[in-house]
Structure formats: C-alpha cells, structure tokens
Amino acid sequence: MKIVVCIPARYGSSRFAAKVLAKDTGKYLVQHTYEQACQAKLPERVIIATDDELVAEACSEFGAECVMTSAEHKSGTDRIAEAIKDIDVDILVNLQGDEPEINPSNIDKVAQLLIDNPDAQMGTLAAKFQRPEQISNPNIVKCVLGADGRAIYFSRSVIPYDRQAEGVGDIKQYLRHLGIYSYRKEFLLKYPTMPQGRLEQIEKLEQLRAIENGYSIMVDVVGHTCDGIDTFEQYAEFVKRYKNRERITED
C-alpha cells in the first residue's frame, strides 16, 4: 500500500504572515515539519504543496519535493487534492506545515488507521487534555468517539457537556482533536466537491463535511501532543525550546 505525506504550506497567514518561512532557528518552519515527516516509517514520500514561488525556492534549498498549486484554494485539503491528483498513491496523510514538533510515530498511526479499517475513508488523531482550562477554549477542538473508535462529532464547544458539573467535568472524559488527517486517494479527490453542510459552516470545522455526508472518520487516541504554530508568540516559544534542545545536545 503506497502512503504519501503531503504538507500544505500556504505563504499567506492572517495571524502570522509568511510563517512557514520563519527561520529564527536557522531552518525554515516548514523545513522542521518536513524533517519530522521524513522520520515516519510508513510513508514512502513526503511532498510540500504551496501556492508561492518563495516557498518553492525555500524547499529547493533543503531538498524537499515541492508542488505548485492554485492560490485560490480555501483549505489545505483542497490544496493537497490538487497536488496529488496525478500521483500513484493509496493513502494520503495531510500534515500541516506549521507542525514542527509533530511526533513521526503519529504520522504512522494516522496512516495505519486506514490500513486496519478498509471500510473507512478518513482517519485522524485525538489526545487527552493536559489542563482543564483548555477544554473550554474554542480554539482547541474537541471530539467525541463511539465505542468503535469512529468520530461522532467535533466541536469548538465543550463536548460532552457535563450537566452535573455545569459544563466541564472530569478532565479524563474529554479528548482534543489533533489536526492531522489520512485519506484514501479517491475520497480525497471527491472531498472538495462535497457540499458544505450546516454544521461545518457553523463550527468552521472542515472535517464535519465528511460526517455530514455520511462518511466515517476513524480516530486513534495518542499520548504525544504538540501545538501548531498559529501566532508569532507561539513561534517564539518554539524557537526557545528548539535552541534549548540544541544546547543540551551540544553539551
């Protein structure tokens, strides 16, 4: 079974302009993500999909395969669908370009979901919460699973709502969604053509499109979590962590 990681790396960003090319560590942000993806065992290829020549030029500097795509795409899923349409592949892993600390084993796990569940068209990951205050944060997406490991729903709200606790109950009963996906190629190519449903429009969560259109999303719960880089402040914290690790390695 052929597995490929595709990293959508859009140049523009409303909260942190040109973040994929930030280079305060000595490496581009997207380069960190690419190098982590290359450590995964199951994928045979890692591709970066971008809409800007500057990103493509940066990719050539560190030897990454890069595909130019339209600047009109509204989501990373649309971008990777264009990037891989002519590639011989069975399973695609969609890894965001701003995930420099992704655990390579998580890339393998999200691909393995579709290997182990041949009837599923899409997979993703979730993890336990680390702090109770994260549960009520609308910027951290929550998910609820069925007994078979399939996603029932994703929301920015607190789900499940603990009535006895008037909202947030025991932290152990909540899961946070991690923004990494796996798709079968045929499904991925079909995905951008599916109509946006009411729930996706309300929550602004693209994965709800699959559920609203009757498709299953398999979910694996993993232990290692890392936040993507959405703001310059988050990037500055990542740079500190990276430089500290480098210093420890040198010592």
Image (cartoon, rainbow, N blue to C red):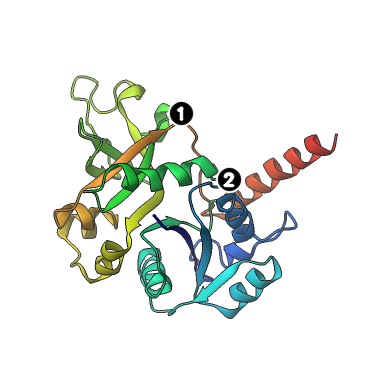
Tell which tag, 2 or 1, sits nearer the viewer.
Answer: 2
Relative to 105, 139 lies left or right: left
Pointer 1: what residue? 130
Say which residue appears at 34% left-offset and 33% top-offset. 175
Relative to residue 196, is residue 125 depicted above or below? above
Tell me the quarter of the picture where residue 88 sits.
bottom left
Between 78 and 107, the one lying in front of the other is 107
Q: Residues within 10 Å of mark 1 (few under 14, many from 20)?
A: few
Q: How many marks?
A: 2
SS class, disc 1: loop
Disc 2 marks a residue whose amino acid type is Glu
Relative to residue 77, is residue 217 depicted above or below? above
| Residue 69 drawn at (x, y percent) | 45, 77
Disc 1 marks a residue whose amino acid type is Gln
SS class, disc 2: loop
| Residue 159 drawn at (x, y percent) | 25, 35
Residue lying furthest front: 1
Pointer 2: what residue? 101
Determine if residue 178 is in view.
no
Determine if residue 17 is in view.
yes
Relative to 21, 42 lies left or right: left
